[in-house]
Amino acid sequence: MNSITIRRPDDWHVHLRDGDVLTGVTPYTARVFGRAIIMPNLVPPVTTAAMAEAYRRRIMAAVPASSGFTPLMTCYLTDATNPADLADGHAAGIFTAAKLYPAGATTNSASGVTAIANIRRVLAVMERIGMPLCVHGEVTDPDIDIFDREAVFIDRVLAPLLRDMPGLRVVLEHATTSQAVQFVDAAGPNIAATITPQHLHLNRNAMLVGGIRPHAYCLPVAKREEHRLALRRAATGGSGRFFLGTDSAPHARHMKESGCGCAGIFNAPHALESYLTVFDQENALEHFERFASLAGPEFYRVPVNEGLVTLVRSDVRIPDVLDAAGTAIVPFHAGETIGWKISSMS
Ligand code: DOR
Ligand code: ZN
């Protein structure tokens, strides 16, 4: 097959930042994706419906008029989140979901949740109203090795939480381990996971062998090869419980090429092509549309997009660096050639 046409996809996990960088990066996402779940880890974080509405407007100002793109906003949960305010924001259509960052787990998570017990009332309300909870699934305990933090989170936090609140609707964001895949496979239809392109392409050797590669560093960090293979089976297997979420997370080049480099991979410019390469390698093109365009809307209970995207086989060289309204950012696959390109959208 040299060409594939799918329903317009959505990105169920993206960081668009703010200010000039927002202006520079948003068109890459809006060009391809019909909707995107917008991460709220700004400084200060998006913790109220008023902040989310103001941020949504700033995003829309950065979206090219003809793109038909809709940002879906999330609420950054803190120990102090008010359950009634959150539910009101959801009922008003401002908050699609809420995001749980364990405090200290990743970029701008210092105001995150310090113990799940502190948001028990919030989660009980979310369970009752069916509001999705997007989870950064890593423990932050300094005694836990960084490569084990997702698996330990599942054991110590997520599994007990779901035993207490079996109806809670949870997306385990950016799954990186076979334990995450097994957990989602064994759970009910209220549990899903997003998978990034980088975790389908890279294992930890790709980040560390032959020199340290800061542009392959994100959180959760890439794991051993066996985990990458489990993620590829999950994404391409057609289950419908794993769907597209890029976790595109732009940082200025100098902030990544640093003695203490930031976590995050800017994959928005060629994310769909990158995913398609994986489905092609796995001989699973027939499951690509489900992963990219159908399973996410099913979980989030929204209609699939009306538009279509066609991709064709063609060698495309990915630029070494891109300019995002004055900020130099190195994209995922920089300097590589990938074998698919978007040929038309309707
Ligand atoms: O690598 C990451 N970057 N992981 C996250 O969880 C946050 C993100 C960011 O905001 O830079
Ligand atoms: Zn993220």
Image: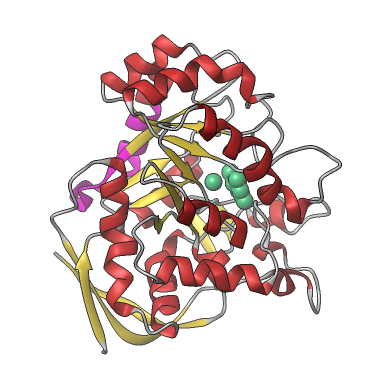
Span of residues in magenta: 55-71
The residue depicted at 26 percent of the width and 89 percent of the height is: 1
The picture places residue 14, in percent across and down from the top left corner, at 45, 47
Q: Against 282, is 241 above or below?
A: above
The picture places residue 154, in percent across and down from the top left corner, at 62, 44
**Residue 222 position by quadrant:** bottom right
Residue 177 appears anywhere in the view: no
Number of labels in the image equals 0
Q: Is residue 47 left or right of residue 140?
A: left
Secondary structure mostly taken by the magenta-highlighted segment of the chain: helix
Q: Against 247, is 228 above or below?
A: below
Q: Is residue 326 left or right of residue 341?
A: right
The picture places residue 223, in percent across and down from the top left corner, at 69, 64
Q: Is residue 132 left or right of residue 252?
A: left
Residue 192 appears anywhere in the view: yes
Q: Against 332, is 21 above or below?
A: above
Report the quarter where the C terminus lies: bottom left
Q: Which of 214/47 is in front?
A: 47
